[in-house]
Amino acid sequence: MSNKLLNIALADDDEDDRMLFSEAIEEITIKTQLTCFKHGQELMEHLNTPNIALPNLIFLDLNMPIKNGMQCLKEIRSNPALRDLCIAIYSTSSSEKDIEETFLNGANIYLNKPNNFVKLQDSVERILQLNWQYHTSNLNKDTFLFRI
Amino acid sequence: MDFKRIYQSSKTYIVLLIISFAIILFTANMAYYQIMRMQDLAEKVAHTLQVNNAISELSAHYTQAESEEFRKQLKTVDTNDALFNSYKEDGTKILDTLKKLTANDSSQQIRLAPMQSLLDTLYEDLYNLSKEPSANSDTLSLEDAEKLQKNNINFTLYRIRNIKNQMLAEERLSIKNARSEYNTNKYLAPLTSLLLAFFALLVFVLAFFKIYRNKLRIRRSEGFLRSVLATTDNIVNYYEPLFDTQKKIIDFKISFANECNRDYLGLDPDKIIGEPISKVFPFLMLNGEFEKLVTSYTEKTKITLDRQISGPDQRLWFKSIITPLADGIMVTARNSTAEEKAKEEQLLLNQQLEEQNLKLLDHRAFLNNIFKSISHVVMNFESVRDSSGAIIDFKILFINDKITPITGDQPQDIINKNISSVFPTIFETEIFGYLKGVVNSGQPTSYEVPYEVDGKTKWFSARAIKLGDGITLTTREITEEKEKTDELLHLNTQLETQNSIFVDAENVANIGSYIWYLDNGEAIISDNFYRILGYEPNTFKVTYESYRKFVHPDDREMYDRLGKETSEHGQSQVNGYRIITKQGDVKHIELNGRSMVRNGRKVSVGVVLDVTEKKEKTDRVAALNQELSIQNSILTDAERIAKIGSFVWHVGTDEIEISDNFYRMIGFEPKGFKSSLKAFRKFIHPEDVKMFDENIKNSTNELKVKEHRYRIITTEGEVKHFEVNGQLIEKNHTSVMLGVAQDITQNIAAEEKLRASNLQLQHSNAELESFNRVASHDLQEPLRKTQMFISRLESTEAENLSEKGRIYFQKVVNAASRMQSLVLNLLTYSRIDSKHEDFDIIDLNEVLAKVKEDLSSNIADSGALIKSEELPAIKGVSYQLEQLFNNLISNALKYRATEVTPNITIQAEKIHSKQIPENFFKIANTYYKITIIDNGIGFSTEHSEKIFEVFQRLHQKSEYSGTGIGLAICKKIIENHHGFIYATSELGKGSAFVFYLPA
Amino acid sequence: MTLFVKYDFNLACKTLLKEHLDAFGISYTLGSLGEVHIKGKLPEEQRQALASSLKRYGIEILDDQKITLVERIKNAIDELLKDEKLKSVKVSSYLADTLNYSYAHLSSIFSESTYTSIENYIILRKVDLAKELICNTDLTLTEIAFQLNYSSVAHLSGQFKKTTGLTPSTFQRIMAKKTNYTTHSQT
């Protein structure tokens, strides 16, 4: 159980953000294996590869070239094989419109990119905990909706 | 039915029964005792008899010893021994018997005790006697000895007899006693037993009757219960438990079921009785009700429950009560379907009511809006009557706020007061009488009434309509109308004057005028026309036919042609004929008429000229012209005031006459240039010339007039907007357009301005939206990353920095966080936008409470005291109002004086818009004035406007942190809420922020 | 002399596991992430023998008792939250009584295997129940607060906002829109 590595995916076009995120996720107690993608297209190609271990949780930036986060979200939610993946939006935008739209399209978690590394760590850890709870406990996945 | 009485009485009967049982038992016992006594007595008597017998036998025995013969026999030697022995044996036997009999009687025993020795003596004597003769041969001495012997015997015998007699006497006494006792018992025993038996019988009979009556009563209650059970709406069932081998209840047997089972559940009660409930009501076993039944049975508790059952054709609701009763349970189920339905219906009804209520509210709001938007004063009065029922006053039930500008009264102040106290003047005029009349007759009345406002007399038109026992009074200010009417009256008088002058002129000029109705030939002719004909005015009725008589017979043909042509074409070539007057004079008259429509009838209007005296005409026409010019000048004045110019255009030509004011409107003195269409066209704005030409063309071709607007460039180069309208008339066989042009430049300018500012608003909105995007993402993105790396550096590299480096680093941190708060504040500022928000009723007390909570750590840190009055609820946007209070209070905390405890006071009052000295556009009649006062550092009054502008800060950054947007946000929020904010302060003494919000 | 070796740790472990399992004659399949699915039941003595032989290589059979205990704690919490009668019962004593362990023990086991404390789990579970009630019933927030044993609506709202980052009303609005949205996009 605690030896299990959680499989996490991150799609973000910003190199700095990818770096900070991987540093943050490395330092938290839950052990993870992070795979990063430079844009939505790359993520979708990976997810559509046959016979791969699907990630337990995907962090998705909204503003990305080639294929943006919203497109990915819609594609994942309309694909029966990927529909049950847990998706956390990871974006700078704090506009209520963006937040609501991602929830409506099936995002589970909305995380504003924090401006502080410790905050990032705390947020990521909380999200992993929540994701863990939703996968191991009898919680209602239909109402899996959090804004961190 | 008194069940309790039955229950209680049976208890009494049980007691009575026990008592009677006890009595019977007692009686039986008594009888038995009596009988036993009797038996005893009888036995006693028998015993006495036996004793007597034994005694008599004894006496016979010793009597034998007396007899001589016995003695002789004793002497007989051969026999004496045997005889004596048998005699002695007999005696002993008898004595033994007697002893046995008297074993229980101690007194007899005592008496009997000496008997043995006596008898022994007797036997001895007798033995001696029998022996004597042989031993004593001396006769005499024998005889003497015998005699002595005999005396001894006799003496013994005497003593025996004595004892016997005593015993007999004793026995006799005992019999006598027994008898007397028997006699007593003989009477007493049957009497008592009879009495007691009789009493017992009585009790039995009584008990029987009582029990019988109870039985009847029980039967009656049973019948009643049965009818109750049969007629009740409730299902009443009685179940008895069924046990398994472990004495556990596994089921219930239905022991009773009433008719309702059939009615509601379709179950025949006769058939289900005796069946187990698991078979009849299988659903009971499913939803835990069975357990409840068991609980009720075992714990003897009453349980109620609700349930729904699918009946044969509908769903039924039941309220059940389970009651333990004797060795079973009674289940009463009330069919509550109707209640549930009623509940639903009531719910529905409630909803409808609520809707209606809402509608009513809507209507009320609508009505209120009407009252607000109309300029009429609307009042509703209720009659106040004296004891005889006559109306003596009216009470104001409603009045809208349009009364305020007139009388200065606030509606809420005068509502529910009597008009005698509010409008006492009504009683001085006949108005009160009018109002009374309306209430009494029910007929609406209208009247006009003057009212003094600010020293000026204003006129009001009022209309009163009866409503209930009262009046609805609608009053409208008609001062202007009244003034206009007065003016009209004035003009009328003038016209009358003119008319009379005209009449005179006619007279002088020998002119007559006429109006000839072409449809029926009737005509109205002027007084002078009558005179021309030689008659006094109005002496006969003029028709086409009656007038024909005056026409010279030679000219009648011409006259007929005139009539025909005028009727058919509206005009005629004929313009003169001769007439013969009453006096027989022949006069030549010329006429000029034109046809027009008057009151919807075609008429020909014209003048006739007595050319017979043509010579004298000229001077009189001059006089007439003069009068006309007066009239003209009046018109001219009117034109100037109304910025109206009039014109007469001869359609299709270049010829146009324009009024003096028209010249002025184009920037000329009257008649400043030669008016022509061409000349006028030069003043038209180049862009509108095309339209002007087209309109001229259309009017010429189609003889129709449309309303137009042109721009004119005056001689001064000013652009003016003219609105032109006119009508076409026929004049001298040509079409003439009479028209007016009005200068509407000001209206247009206002419209233009509005449009321009709207456009500007749209632009700035679009700009704001794009700024919003920029601020929320593009600007934040690099800032965020900067801060992120700062936080990385702070945690990992801070130790590696030099002292100076650490100071610089801290400055970078501060600058970045300041930048962030700036961006966020700007974002807040740009997002405050009224058009996207819905206004709700917001309780400002709640807003303040929330803000205080949000700022609680700041408040605690500064030790500030915040006092607030009861705040009102207003229409607004909750988060904006929170922001407003948050900014103002945190400002007060931020700019606090260092040496004193911050003290913040929040006040609220309701005031009328007229009482607000500040100049801003007021949309409401009343406002809430909210003031936030602090004792902080304040600012000098010269800055009081500046502080509300974006990025205006009065303090150095280092002293007080802030972005300079907080108050700008406040101002924007207040403006969004149609309010006004300002601040007053004195440097070092604190400041007061005041804002008004519509109530 | 030094030899350089390259080894596949994963393969090494798997091979080792296979050898041992084969030696014990157990029929099995290897799952990912260190799971061994055993067909049928593994007798206790066989399990212990396997555990001790694997221990030498640093391979440990995880004690599934902890997992079941955590599940039992969760079930007990669900019971506690759902049962009206247990409203006033104190969580710690309830769990200790029903599961027969000290609360400290339960607490540490729970945190160890779920990355969260029992207290936090209860809050999450309550908020989850509140979410369900908001979505699927017509109950007002006041009624929901009462049902879930909150002292006030404000308390519920506060905890809801703190846990989910959304106010109950925002959540309700999003869920209502989402239902429309999905049904709409499906048709």
Image (cartoon, rainbow, N blue to C red):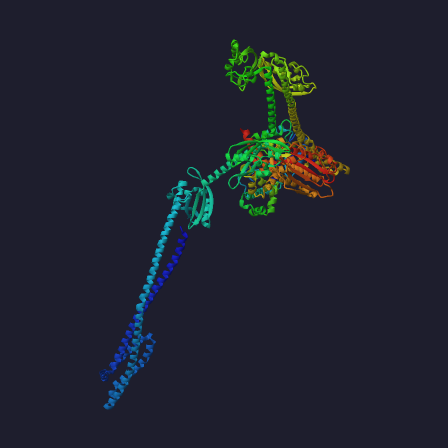
Against B183, residue B447 (above or below) is above
Q: Quadrant of the rendered structure where residue B757 is?
A: top right
Q: Is residue B636 visible?
A: yes
Front residue of B496 and B882:
B496
Question: Relative to residue B723, is residue B25 drawn left or right?
Answer: left
Residue B964: x, y in percent?
71, 34
Examine the image and state in which quarter residue B812 appears: top right
The x, y position of residue C80, in whole percent, is 55, 44
Residue A110, x across and y down, in percent: 62, 34
Residue A30 against residue B63 in the figure, above or below: above
Left-right relation of C180 to B49: right
Q: Quadrant of the C terminus of chain B?
A: top right
Query: Which residue in the rendered view is the most extreme toward the front?
Result: B583
Q: Nearer the viewer, residue B810 or B279?
A: B810
Given residues A87 and B958, the one toward you in this image is B958
The residue nearer to you, when weighing B832 against B144, is: B832
Number of marks: 0
Snapshot quadrant of residue B796: top right
**Image position, residue B384 (x, y; %):** 54, 39
Q: Is residue A58 visible?
A: no
